[in-house]
Structures are given as C-alpha cells and as structure tokens.
Image (cartoon, grey):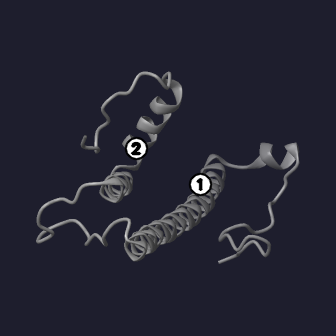
Amino acid sequence: MNTDSETGRPGAGPERTSTPNEEATLSPEQVVVALLRQQESLLSELNWAYEQLERSQEQELVDIKARVTQLERQVSKTGGGRFLPATGAGAGEAPSGLIAVTRKRVEFSIRNPRKALKLAERRLRRPSSAPTLEAGRST
C-alpha cells in the first residue's frame, strides 16, 4: 500500500494524469475499474482520517478526566471541598456544590457531545440576564 510521506496517509500514491485522447479510447469497463480504484483510494483515506479523529478524541477525554480529578484533589487539599468518587453504581448520594456540578457537566459532555455543543451554543446566543435550565444539569 502506498503512503503519503508527509502525512502518512494510505493510498496517496502518485496521481496518473491522462490526456483527452487516452480517455476517449478507454472502454466502459476500464472507466468503471478506474472509478472503483479511485473510490477505494478515497475510502482508505477517509478511514485513516476517521481513525485519527477517534484517537484524538479518546486522548482528549482521558486528558479531561485526568484534569477534573486533579482539580478535585487540589480543592480537597485546600479544604474548600472534598474529593468526589466517580459517579455510577455504588457512588451513593450525589454530592452537592461546585465540584459536583462541574463533574456532572463534564460527564454529560462526554456522554452527549452533540447535545453539550448545542447547549453551549444556546448559552452563548442568549442574553446573560435570562437563565434557563439545561439538560444534564441539576439545580
């Protein structure tokens, strides 16, 4: 499989250019085969890009979770709050306060990135004097 030396993407071999005379002499089967090869190349490039996006998102989620945990520990050391266990089965009663709200927001954003984006866009568009309830947040 060919790869692009600059980006590492598969299927990025040298492109073949043809003259109008060559295209006119191609049979319909040859045209179909050429189009299928081009489609295959584009699909492999799309798969590569999608895999890169997934890896990037996974790393960002790990970084966000680590940062939230680090901030919770810093707050608990200063006495301004307490360390919160991860929510889920066996977590018991939901803690209150800024840390709990922040954790809920982060977990909601991780579970529902599209909804979180829409809510953030809505928050940015609305006037600051009109508070509204948001999905994924408890008051």
Tell me how far mark 1 sits from mark 2, CA to CA: 35 Å
Q: How many marks?
A: 2
- Of labels 1 and 2, earlier in sequence is 1
Q: Residue at x 28, y 44 (%)?
A: 136
Q: Quadrant of residue 4?
A: bottom right
User: Mark 2 is on which residue type?
Assistant: Ala
Where is residue 10 drawn, in percent x and y? Answer: 65, 71
For residue 2, what is the image quadrant? bottom right
State the residue position of label 1. Answer: 39
Which class describes the residues within 10 Å of circle 1: few (<14), some (14-19), or many (20+)?
few
Where does the image place residue 44, in percent across and percent down from the top left? 57, 64
Residue 41 vs residue 72: left or right?
right
**Above or below 117: residue 103:** below
Compared to residue 5, the image places residue 64 above or below, namely: above
Q: Quadrant of the C terminus?
A: top left
Residue closest to the eye, 8 or 83: 83
Residue at 62% across / 60% down in the picture? 37
Query: Residue sitting at 79 percent across and 72 percent down?
Result: 6
Measured as percent of width and height from the top left, residue 112 is found at 34, 49
Instruction: Give the residue drawn at x 81%, y 60%.
Output: 16
Q: Which residue is mark 2?
A: 116
Q: Measured along the vertical axis of the image, is residue 133 above or below residue 127?
A: below
Compare residues 122 and 17 and report the one nearer the observer.
Answer: 122
Badge 1 element: helix
- Counting from the top left corner in percent of width and height, residue 1 is at 65, 78
Q: Nearer the viewer, residue 138 or 118?
A: 138
Circle 2 packing at 10 Å, graded few (<14), some (14-19), many (20+), is some
Q: Which of labels 1 and 2 is toward the front?
A: 2
Q: Are marks 1 and 2 in contact (CB under 8 Å)?
A: no
